[in-house]
Image (cartoon, grey):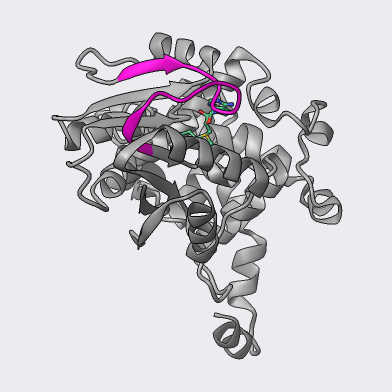
Amino acid sequence: MAEHLSQSELDYPFKLLEYFNGFRVSKVIFSACELGVFDLLLHSQKPLSAEEVSHELRTSKDGMKRLLDVLVGIEILEVELTEGTAHYSSTDVANLYLAKSSPKSLHDMIIYQSQTIYPLWNNMVDAVREGKNQNEKTFGLSSEDIFSAIYRSEEEMLKFMGLMNSTWIIDGHDIVTAFDLSCFKSIVDVGGCSGALARELAKAYPASTVTVLDLPKVVQTAQKHFIQSDDTIRFQEGDFFKEDLPAADLYVLARIIHDWKEEKCLTLLKKINAACHPGGGVLLVEALLFENHRGPIMAQIFSLNMLVQTEGMEHPPSQYTHMLTAAGFTDVQVCRTGKSYDAILALK
Ligand SMILES: C[S@@+](CC[C@H](N)C(=O)[O-])C[C@H]1O[C@@H](n2cnc3c(N)ncnc32)[C@H](O)[C@@H]1O
């Protein structure tokens, strides 16, 4: 990308300007979500003028008109002019992913990005200078205990769990079918949060039992806010650093290793290896970096996010292989999905 960019941008820096303005595009989408634009347009029987939208959502007409126009410019909304007045309607993509009421909604992901990640990224210069997370500067909380910072209030815990949950709406199926896991009859999703990935596992492997293990207050919140009437998954309260892990055939660690320093990751992986039934395994789910440092851009951005928010980072497959073999696992297989998250399976 660098060579291509440096050559094509010499006459006029189109791409660079687009990159500089990327945060403004994000903020437009975040603001429209927070104001409820996409839900209003989804439920409206007809295209709406800026005046109608602003009236319904109690905003200024001028501000709403400009916001709607940018959303048209980035092709998230459509516009038609009738007798000189612009009428706005949603695209299928906005209806599917941006409206809160859609079953594939990424609304919770957007709210977390807007209200938590955005302020953290505002301290990126300090994060890079200091090489540590910015929970203290951003939210006035200790940077040592990362999950105390992330779960600093019930509202924040719900927002974080909503973020985790919405990822698996779009990526869950690809992850659980990256390998045939049907031989593993008991599966524990370690740090499984709201249970969204566990539900995908239970759907794909109905003959297996799937248990979500997480901190007590997370399990209680999952059971209060994320439980589904047809749930077959189980929940177990526990601390994966302090307590014994239940015995199982397969342990899933989705976005766990990237939170912690290598030493803690090794402790956890060794503990899993000890608890794992003979012939069992571990499935790591992470955004895998390329070995050559050239991408994927989303994994590189996630790694910077781990810097501002946690004590961990994203890794290329070789680093996960190194940790897994150091913890006693063998037969490491890597599956890149080509989407946000990838899977690595290793056996005991
Ligand atoms: C980044 S989230 C990943 C959640 C989920 N696996 C996913 O990918 O959606 C990390 C999870 O680990 C849990 N966690 C953190 N520390 C833990 C501990 N000591 N014991 C058990 N769970 C823990 C958090 O509550 C959270 O659900």
**Where does the image place residue 231, in percent across and percent down from the top left?**
24, 18
Toward which corner of the image does residue 339 lie, by quadrant? bottom left
* Residue at x-position 64% and y-position 72%: 16
> Which residue is pictured at 84% across the width and 35% down the height?
137
Q: Nearer the viewer, residue 79 or 209?
A: 209
Check the image and report above or below for 63 versus 148: below
Count of number-bearing discs: 0
The residue under the point 64% across, 89% down is 11
Q: In the orientation shown, which residue stands out farthest toward the left? A: 207
Left or right for 194, reference 125: left
- Residue 31 image offset from top left, x and y in percent: 56, 36
Residue 93 is a magenta residue? no
Nearer to the camera, 93 or 86 = 93
Quick one: quadrant of the N terminus?
bottom right
68 up-or-down from 333: above or below: above
Which span is picked out in magenta?
234-251
Displayed quadrant of residue 335 = bottom left
Residue 37 visible: no
Identify the residue at image location x=47%, y=50%: 328
Q: Position of residue 276 (x, y in %)?
A: 37, 36
Q: Is residue 246 visible?
A: yes
> Does residue 3 lie above or below 198 as drawn?
below
Picture coordinates of residue 157, whole percent (x, y) = 57, 20
Q: Nearer the viewer, residue 298 or 79?
A: 298
